Amino acid sequence: MTQRATIDFSTYGEGKLFDNNYYQAEGIVFTGRTNYWAGYIQGDAALTVHKPYPMMADFLIPVNSLSLQYAAGGQGWQDVSLTALDINSQSINSVSLSYNEYGSAGYKTINLVILSRPTYSFILEVISGDGGVSSITFSQTPVPEPTSLLLLGTGLVGLMGLKRKRH
């Protein structure tokens, strides 16, 4: 059964240094840079992300999909890249978002579906501009344990044997 979690940074508050372990109970720990700030960007609470410091986080359980709400902190070109990493910190999948921010365009969704193998961490890199992430949504599919797979395989072999015996 797939479990879906959403981390909404408005629950953290505003104008203070962010505790990287604050959302550990929800399954995510922020790593890398230690000076994330919780503030308001385009009227919504967000964790700030600035060039050249990427947002990095590790998942406590591997995830299959990831979605972030990103907004520009100012006007001009915004180029951001989201990369999912496997257990060996190798890139699994990556997606980029580029747009020219004029006025108040609001938050953009960056979606990344990982189909090949589960991801254990991600990096959100701001290539130009600056902004913030208001929420992160991720889906986790528990990996079956080997004993369950052995039991399933034994049952299937038994069913095949019954079918052959009847014919």
Image (cartoon, grey):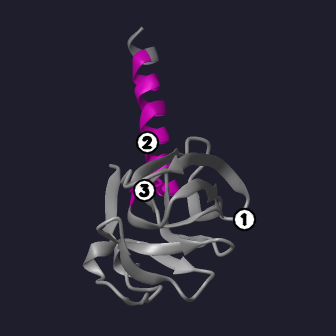
Residue labelled with disc 1: 88
The residue stretch that appears in magenta: 136-163
- Label 2 to label 1, Cα distance in Å? 30 Å
Residue 140, can we see it? Answer: no
Residue 91 image offset from top left, x and y in percent = 71, 55
Judge by depth and name the residue closer to the eye, 98 or 163.
98
Q: Count the labels in the image.
A: 3
Which class describes the residues within 10 Å of circle 1: few (<14), some (14-19), or many (20+)?
few
Query: With respect to residue 29, does 145 lie above or below?
Result: above
Residue type for callout 1: Asn
Residue 59, can we see it? Answer: yes
Q: Quadrant of the C terminus?
A: top left
Residue labelled with disc 3: 142
Helix, strand or loop status at disc 2? helix
Query: With respect to residue 108, does 136 lie above or below?
Result: below
Residue type for callout 2: Leu
Residue labelled with disc 2: 152
Q: Is residue 101 magenta?
A: no
Of marks 2 and 1, the one in the foreground = 1
* Res. 45 image quadrant: bottom left
**CB atoms of marks 3 and 2 within 8 Å:** no
Judge by depth and name the residue closer to the eye, 135 or 159.
135
Residue 34 image offset from top left, x and y in percent = 57, 88
Residue 157 image offset from top left, x and y in percent = 49, 32
Residue type for callout 3: Pro
* Res. 163 image quadrant: top left
